[in-house]
Each structure stands twice: as structure tokens, then as C-alpha cells.
Amino acid sequence: MIWNTLLLALRAIRRNLLRSFLTILGIVIGVAAVITMVTLGDGATKAVSDQIASLGTNLLTVRPGQRLAGFGFLGAPAFKLDDADALRAQISGIRVVAPTVNRSVTVVSGANNWATSITGSSLDYFSAGNWKLAGGRYFNESEEHAGKAVCVIGDTIRRELFGSQNPVGGEIRVKQFSCEVIGLLAAKGQSAMGTDQDDTIVMPLRTVQRRLTGNTDVRALMVSVRDEVSTDKVKKQIEQLMRERRRLTESEDNNFTVFDTRQIAETLTGTIKVMTMLLGAVAAVSLLVGGIGIMNIMLVSVTERTREIGIRLAIGALEREVLLQFLIESVVLSAFGGLVGITVAVAASAGLAYLMQVPFLFNPGINLLAFLFAAAIGVIFGFFPARRAAHLNPIDALRHE
Amino acid sequence: MNESAQPEPLIRLAAITKSYGQGAAAFQALRGVDLEIAAGEFVAIMGPSGSGKSTVMNILGCLDTPTAGSYRYDGVQVEKLSRNQRALLRRNYLGFVFQGFNLLARTTALENVELPLLYRGEPAAARHAASREALRAVGLKGWEHHTPGELSGGQQQRVAIARAIVTHPTVLLADEPTGNLDTRTSHEIMELITRLNRDRGITVLMVTHEHDIAACAQRTVHFKDGRVERDTANAGSAR
Ligand SMILES: Nc1ncnc2c1ncn2[C@@H]1O[C@H](COP(=O)(O)OP(=O)(O)O)[C@@H](O)[C@H]1O
Ligand SMILES: [Mg+2]
């Protein structure tokens, strides 16, 4: 009996191709939208939290100028190397301090050139920034002191200048001097703000000061806080110490800013989570709209279907056989729609994740949820009108207007 | 006459009433119908429009239930049957032909005829053979794969008759089967129904407005105002 009823259900689907197609379409759109939105949101959140990990733990950055004061950066005096030493010596919660300067330059190797940014810093820079070596070595203390022309390069520089060759031991030209590549950094990928972290060259601070900036200014201090110490507390201590060192009076505002990079990243993660929920809600509405579309199709066809049920009852179908047929019919349609929806969603979110450069994370929970919801919609709107009709006297079902 | 010596008729309606609506607005479509049909009979039912012919046919076909009265089919008290048992009675013993054909749209003639057999759970091969045979019997060989939309009214009614007889029912109930057809087609359908009664011994009850069509039957029952007005044997049609 079940096979015959299955056959009846499949025939009914084939008989009403347009109605079946529209039902499936409604479910496909709803399911695909919800899954795609949530999957992309998950990917974006993952990208940001990966980012937080790669930033290094408990990292503070001190820069001259006021963050919100427009041109404040220009007027504020730069730091010097002894500012870094003072922080390291006087604040016990600090693990390492790396003084940094930056310069945008075009670097050349053989026939290749590449516009990038060179960072001059100390050995602590690598530990503060949570960098790892992929090959070669970091510069040593004597190279740092002597201001030797050596550099550690990021993965993007290797790709652009050296291609598939091993860069360690090679040379790059920076303006008028040439510099030996002694180390290659392990790739980190994009930062939370969308910049390429691997597009970087690190040299000893003194090398950059002497050869590129021509002064002893330090543009930023990267401070890594000890794990067991509160970042906020260290931030306050840094502010107090720097105010003293810069001789600011009570009435003057800070002419420097301490950024908590992790806090920024966490704010960003929060924002993305909210966005994901918002997009998920929008997508849920589209699932609902799909459901209403299905309901419409079912209601429009209820007269025809009621008469069809009347015919079936009149020639001797049992009520439960009619119900089983309609149940199978709606389950087959919505399950098929749900599966197509999941397929479309996986393809769309994998493609969009690639374009947006966020990881693609298959989320079984949302797939299952959307599928079950679609199935429920199909069954509710396909099955319950049929249940009413199948309970009528055959003649009343046949006469349905 | 000794009542108890008579065999039980196939169908016996006693004091059947049917009212539509409630209270003061209630309308009595049947006001006490008594009717006996013997197995193998061909009975025509006539009467003015609104006299309750269709109502009684629907009750006989178990498509509807009477308000009161007794309906015995082959010794079985039909009012006492459950919904499912009445469906099984329709499935196994009764065939119904409607004025409006009532075929499944966008479904081939073969699949329409096959439908009752599907509900009987018959295997595919037997189903197909029986359906083709039924279509051949109503003169539709070669039209198996046409849908109702591709068939004329007469052909659609033949498909409906094939669907009704494919289960080899005991009784064929036809409510104005030729009501929507032209005269020539009507006579072809009538010949078909007469043949089913004569050759297969199917008991036929048929509602019609046409005297010449009623003349095909052995007996004519006249309805008026929800009652049997007259019940006459047709002289000319003695077999
Ligand atoms: N579903 C219904 N609701 C209310 N009245 C009905 C219904 N069906 C039939 N009637 C009424 O019952 C009477 C008998 O109808 P019917 O048996 O169809 O007559 P006919 O002899 O023309 O076939 C008519 O007056 C009709 O209006
Ligand atoms: Mg009628």
C-alpha cells in the first residue's frame, strides 16, 4: 500500500509541475538565504577572532597625538628610544616593549619591485607581535646595535620579490642601500581591518633611523603586557608615566594615545556578531516569505485539490490513504526544496566567503534548522488543508466550490 | 405473497429521509423513500429537477449519509458501517458515474482508470492489464495516454465508466451520465451501459431526464418532492 501511495504522490507532483516548482522555489530561496547569511557571518566572526589571536596577546600600542583630535598627530612630539627603556624599567607588568618607526618605500630585487612599508624595531617586536619564523633567523643584538643592513621579510614580500626562490641569503635594494634577507616570517594573512599583515619588512631600529628617516624619533611603542597582569592597569600606568615624561600639566590633555589592539578587535567581533544576527533575521524573514508563498499556492489550489480528494474518496480511497499521499507529497516537495536550498547555500556561501576572504565554515546546526523549518512549512501548508478535505463526505468534497 | 420466502433484494431503502440545513431553515430533500432493487436489475430514475434523485443516488453510492431511515446493501446495514467500511464498500462493490465525469485533470485515461486498482493494492502488471481491458470495453483502445483535456465529452464519460467498471462492481450508479452530452453520444453511452447490464450482469441504477433513454431500462422509478411517486416496469424492454 505504501508503494502505491508513494506512486500516487509522485504522480500528483508530476501532474502539477508548476505548483510543485513554485513550492520548491519558495523553500529553496528561504533555506538558501538563511544558511548563506549565517555561514558568512560565522566566517567573518572566525576571521576576526583568528585575527585577535595573531595580534599577540595583551598588546598595547602607544602613539604620539590624540586619537580623535584631528591633526593632533602632527603637532605632538615623537617618542625617543629612552621612552621605551623607561616603560620597560618602571612598569613591572610589562613583558616587552618594542619601539618602532615606519617608512613607505619601494623595494627592488632583481627585476622585481614592490611598494611596501619598512618597520624598524628591536628583537622584541617579533615577540610582541606574535610573529613566527618560517625560515632563517631574526637579527641579533650586535646587528641591532650596529644598525646593520639586514632584514626579516613577510610572506607577501617573498612572493612578490622572490617568487618560488628561497629569499633567505638574498638581497633587496631599498633606495640607495642594499640589505641582506636573513629571515622569513610565517604568513599571518589579513588583519581585522583588511590590511595584509604579511606585506612587511622588519629591520633593526637603528638601520631605519640612520638610512631612511634620518633622525632618532620613534613613532610607536608596542607594549606586550604580562599574561597575569590587567591590560587596563598597565594602560593607566603607561599614561601616567608618559604624562610625566612629556611634562604635561594637570590641565593639559594627553598628547599621545594608548591603543588596546585586542579591545579594538573585540569590538569588531561584537559588531560582526550583531551584523550576523541582523542578516540572519533578514534571512529568516525571507524564509517566512517563502513559507507564505507556499501557503498561497496551497490555498489557491485548495478547491482543485478538495475536488481531487472527493474523486479519490468516491472511488474507494480510505481517508488515511488520502492523507498519507498528501503527507508524502508535501514531505517530498519540501525535503527536495530543502536539499536544493542547502546545496545552493553551500555553493553561494563558499563562493562569497572566497570573494570576501573569510573562512568558509559549514554550520550543521543552521543547515538542519533551516531544513526542518522548510519541511515543517511544506507539511503544515500541504497537509493540513488536505486533512480537512479528506474528512468530508465524498460528495461534499466533490461539490467544493 | 409470502414475504419471508422472497430472497433479500440487493438493495433495500426504507423510510430514508435527508434534510439539509438546521432548524427553521432546514430543507427536506428526501421525505421517506422506500425502494428495493434486485440483483441484475436495470432501473431508470426519473423525476423533475430538485425531486431528490441525486440525493438518493449519493446515499446509495455511500457518498453521503441519510438523516434517518435504513439502507441495507446485500443484507448489510449500511448506517452501522464506519467511514472506512463504507469506503471499502465503494471500492469493492459500487461504481459511480457522474454527470460531470469527475476525472483527475492532467492525468492520462489509463492512470485515471487505474486509480481504483491502486487503492485496492493490485500489482502494476495486473493493474495495467485490467485498465487497458476496461478502456477497450468502453471503446477507447488507443486513447490510453490522452488526458481529459484532450478527449471529447463522450470520451471522458467513457473513461469515467471504464474507471467505474474496472473493479468489476456489483452495482453501477450513474447520475445523469448523458446530461452533458449530445444526442448521438448519449445513445452510444446508453448502449454501453445497457451492454454492461446485459453481458456482465451489473446492476444498474441510472438517473435520466430522457424518456427514450429510460426506455432502455427494465423498470422506471419516478421521484417527486423527495418521494417515490411511481414505480413501473417497462413493457418493451423485457429481455
Ligand atoms: N448540499 C445541499 N444543500 C442544500 N440543499 C441541497 C443540497 N443538495 C441538494 N439540495 C436540495 O435538495 C433538493 C434535491 O436535490 P437533488 O437531489 O440534487 O435533486 P435532483 O432530483 O434534481 O437531482 C433540491 O431542492 C436541492 O436544492
Ligand atoms: Mg441531480
Image (cartoon, rainbow, N blue to C red):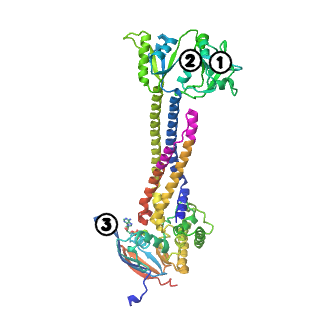
- Residue beneath disc 3: B26
Find out if the beta carbon at label 3 lies less than 8 Å from the nearest ligand 1 atom.
no
Whether marks 2 and 1 lie on the same chain: yes
Magenta stretch: helix, strand or loop mostly? helix
Identify residue type, mark 1: Val
Residue picked out by circle 2:
A122
Position above or below: A86 against A401: above
User: Is B9 placed left or right of B168 in the picture?
Assistant: left
> How far apart are the two marked residues, 3 and 2, measured between alpha carbons?
101 Å
Left or right of A357? Residue B100 is left
**Circle 1 is placed at which residue position?**
A107
> What residue type is disc 3 on?
Ala
Spatial CA distance of label 2 from label 1 is: 21 Å
For the residues marked 3 and 1, what is the alpha-carbon distance in whole angstroms?
100 Å
Can the viewer see residue A401 in this picture? no
Asked if A145 appears above or below B81 in the picture, the reply is above
What residue span does the magenta drawing correspond to?
A347-373
